[in-house]
Amino acid sequence: MGGNQSTPKITPQDRAILDLKLQRDKLRQYQKKIQVVLDREHAIAKAHISTGQKDRAIIALRRRKYQQGLLLKTDGQLENLEQLVSTIEFSLVEVSVLHGLKQGNEVLKEIHREMNVESVEKLLEETTEAREYQREIGEMLSNNLTLDEEDAVQRELLQLQADIVCTHISKARQPLTCTLLGGAVSSSARVTRCPVGGASHIAFTRFAVHSQ
Amino acid sequence: MHRRGVGLAAFDRQEQSQRSFAELSSALSQSQVDHLHLQLNQFRTSLAHFATTHRNSIKNDPSFRYAFQQMCSSIGVDPLAGPRKGGWWAELLGLGDWQYELGVQIIDVCVSTRERNGGLIEMSELIRLVSKLRGVSEGAITEDDIVRSVKTLQPLGAGYQIVEIGGTKMVRSVMKQLDEDQTVILSIAQEEGGRVIEDMLIHRKGWTRDRARAALENMLLRDGLCWLDEQDERSGRAYWIPSAMQWDL
Amino acid sequence: MALSTQTITTGFLLPSIHSAPPFFTQQPNPSTQSIATEQWVRLILTYARHRKLFVLRVEDTETGGSDWGEILRNERINRKVLPSHLSSILEAMVAKNVAAYDPPKQTRSVLLYWRLPEEWADVLHEWATSTGQLNTILTFYDITDPPIESPLSNIPVPLLRKAIAILVKSGRAQSIGVADGEGVRFFTPSR
């Protein structure tokens, strides 16, 4: 049973069981004794017959019969006792099983208390909400844009295109200035091919050199 | 013509010839010595070779061992005598241990049987038990081997000695000195398979009853050399000498 | 005369010394006697273990055909141990703690310890464990006369009591007494 308790207490039941078992032992020993007597009477009867003393043999056999009756009776008693002992021992096992079941039940109850219906519903609700939220984020990220947003994107595109057109115009103007000032034509030709942002700047530096 | 020289020159010449004779002789003897050395070396190597190739035979075959022993002793060496006495022979041949090993086994048997035989064991019994201990068949160890081994045990000072009682060799492993009467009793015990009674000593040796009783009781009480049997059918009091009885270990 | 070992009817191998006539006489030389006694003690214990005998009585030298006949007598050489001799052997055994006078306060009969009470205690607990009888109340009769023969069958109650006392001390058993007798309950020792 328990792993940690030291010697278990001796209960009245224990004593009762011991008492019963001791009675049973006594019966068993008594049976052994009778068996010996039976064998002896048998031998005596045999001996008498071999010496021709029929009467005596019959007496021995009668005695034997009587003892045999006793043996049968004790058999019944012994059976009763043994049944009783096993019933009690089995009941003890049942008790301990019951005890185990009870304990298990307690634990189960404790667990159930932790999970009443409301808190479970709430928990489930919360879980659904959280899942919903998660889904939204997912959808957002997976490019479902609103109409307004689409418009904004389109506007941004137009703006960019406008910017680019504007820069081209300013580039076309610059080389013209250089020739007017008598600078190297070849280099300015190269400059035109430069990206839009840097071209005007280069043009100005060159201009500065020539002016010295 | 005075060929025969006299005077100083002749003397010189004579001396010279003498010297050259001496030289010759020393050269000769040198070559002889060399030759001998060579032979000795050869002998050594062949002996070593012989011993190594026949080591098992030397260890296990008593007649072969005896022949080998004879051969070696004729040239003044004893390769079986043990590492110290055998010197380099023993080392070279690796046979010195054999005798010591046997010695240890003799001690083993003597000590383990001392309780019941009082430290006196018959030679054949000892050989039988040593053979059993070595796991070799009887006859693989001879009396000669035992005698030799017991001799190597003498420096131990434990009193190992071979005594002869009534024509039977016995090995004694205790310091006790046997007196003459005891020797007689032992020899009778050997004839009788261990059992001795007073009457035997009186009738066969002409002892008085007192002498016989005193000698036997001494062996029994003082020396512990025999056991008493008070249920002897014929004399009622017999003495049994364990060393004269044959025991299965 | 060759003294050899001998296998007897019960399958026991008698040592060669058992065929030596003087072995059956008490030796007057003390050192010889102690050797002889030692041999006797060993012989008695090994024979007792072989035949599961628990009790040796001085009378066993006298009663022919007793359990001890094969040992205390040697018909082949017509020798037997005399009561006074056996009595001194019993004394030596008690002194060596390989036997105990039982009942106490007499010197005619001993309980043989071919297993020491401590060893019996272990055997007992092991038997209870292997037969599933832990935590059950058992009578002594349950142990000494089990339906299936066990190493403890026929163990004398005094010896059983000693073994149980050892188990109680080490927390492996509990003895229960009622007006009518005693019982015992075994369990796995608490740690």
Image (cartoon, coloured by chain):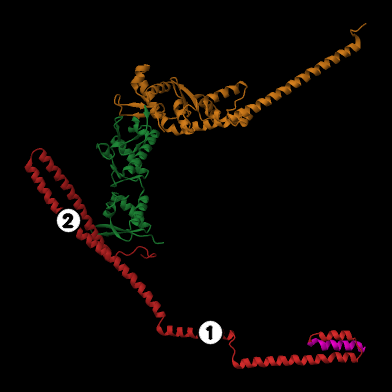
Chain colours: A red, B orange, C green
Q: How many marks?
A: 2
Instruction: Give the answer, above or below, for where B209 lies relative to C151.
Output: above
Q: In which image quadrant can residue B51 be found?
A: top right
Q: Chain of mark 1?
A: A
| Residue B16 falls inside the magenta stretch | no
Identify the residue under disc 2: A74
The image position of residue A151, as x and y in percent, is: 63, 93
The image position of residue C137, as x and y in percent, is: 29, 60
Q: Residue at x 84, y 14 (%)?
A: B17
A124 sits left or right of A152 in the view:
left
Q: In which image quadrant can residue C76 be found?
A: top left
Identify the residue under disc 1: A135
Q: Residue at x 62, y 91 (%)?
A: A150
Amino acid type of disc 2? Thr
Instruction: Give the answer, above or below, for where C167 lies relative to C87.
Output: below
B120 sits left or right of A12 in the view:
right
Q: Which residues are magenta?
A: A196-212
Numbered disc 2: secondary structure:
helix
